[in-house]
Image: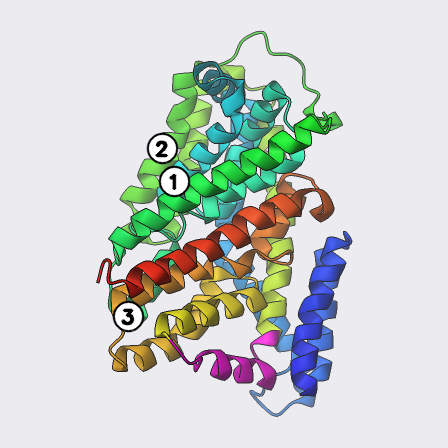
Amino acid sequence: MLGMIGMIGGLVLLIWLTMRGMNLLIVAPLAALFVALMNGLPLFPQLAEKGAANYLTGYMEGFSGFIMSWYLMFLAGAIFGKVMEDSGAADAVSKWIVDKLGMKQAVLAVVAACAVLTYGGVSLFVVAFSVYPMAVSLFKEADLPRRFIPAALAFGSTTFTMTSAGSPEIQNWIPIEFLGTTPLAGWEVSLIVAVFMMVFGYWWLRKMIRKAVSNGEHFIERESDHREEREELPHPLLSLIPLLVVLIVSFGFHDSLGTSALIVALSGGVIATYLLNRRYFRNFGKAVSEGTVGAVVAIANTAAVVGFGGVVKQTPAFATVVDGITNIPGSPLIGGAVAVGIIAGLTGSSSGGQAIALPLLGPHYLDMGVNAEALHRTVALSSGSLDSLPHGGYTVTTIRSIAGETHKDAYPAMGAMTVIVPILGSILAVILFSLGLGI
């Protein structure tokens, strides 16, 4: 009982301190320490039996393992975003989109850009890095409150694209290993759910923004936004080419290179931006340097939360939670959705929630005769819900490191888009599958 209180208390502490604006690099290990102490884990490997769980090893394996796996991807993505900004390519594309869609469609433009890149296989973090400069320009031109930028970025990336049938994102691929399905599993239901999330989420986001504008909110410039007006911008169609390079290369090499295709694709995007727009750069070297610093800050924040999840996974309380939620009575699809969603929330990771739950859920539910495709799509959708609580790595990185906002200002809208909308989508999927659609 004490261990369970410690695990839940540690999560609450992490969320509360994060919402208050404390640095994740301090908050995450402190919250993990609280979990470890309440669960009786030794603090150091020297105090534990050989190979036994302990606080230091659990935290640092999670922290360093994430950096080892994703640093080059973060680096390439951050540099790509900066060179797009410094060359004027992001401004050129944003102005062109505004001219074509009108100022009122600024939000739609940001969401659409994120959706295209995400469904093309570009990592969520990279999409946020890449599209943010364009989003700032669009929101500035349309005079919309910038605190809604993280919500627009996340909505286009983590809802109707990330977990949909055919998506090359890892959240759609993990179930294949355990359920023997394909990336197109349950595509009929997935299509309906995706359309629902897209339409409902966009309507809700626009409603929140309109309310804020009617209350007198508008775009507030920052010192970092004050750039000299460019006498000339690159051609918008040429500026779109680097984005297409990232999309095409990441999609084309995904099967052969896996996640490494993202590094190749983003590096190709940087090269394409330089070759096509080199005469428009203000300071290419400075843009690369700033991108590098941004990548380090972003990945460190994310890794800090992954380290917290590494400690949580070692506790007896976590094993109890996993055992309990994988044996929820009623429809196996409900049990699967709840199990993956809760574990994703505890670890702050959608992929982590699947990787932990599916080895247990898969054989158990398949032996019960549950349709594998229905289970695949349901758990994929639910994994993209509670993973976006305030302490989630993507949430913190997007709000703090990329957009420079506070949780107090930006999270209400972002939470609505990335938690509530996917939960509703998961419920809709369970209902449709229960009615026999797509089975």
Confirm whether residue 121 shows in the render: no
Q: Which residue is mark 2?
A: 245
Mark 3 crowdedness (10 Å alpha carbons): few <14, some 14-19, many ≥20: many
| Span shown in magenta | 312-330
Q: Are marks 2 and 1 in contact (CB under 8 Å)?
A: yes
Q: Amino acid at mark 1?
A: Ala
Which amino acid does the dot numbered 2 rest on?
Answer: Val
Q: Give the image location of residue 82, x and y in percent.
A: 56, 32
- Locate the C terminus and report the quarter of the image it occupies: bottom left
Which is more foreground, mark 3 or mark 2? 3
| Marks 3 & 2, CB-CB < 8 Å contact | no
Q: Residue at x 46, y 16 (%)?
A: 96
The residue at which mark 1 appears reads as 265
- In the image, which is nearer the foreground, mark 1 or mark 3? 3
Mark 3 lies on a secondary structure that is helix
Query: Percent from the top left, x then y, of residue 274?
Result: 46, 25
Which residue, given by chain and number where applicable, does mark 3 sit on?
A: 179
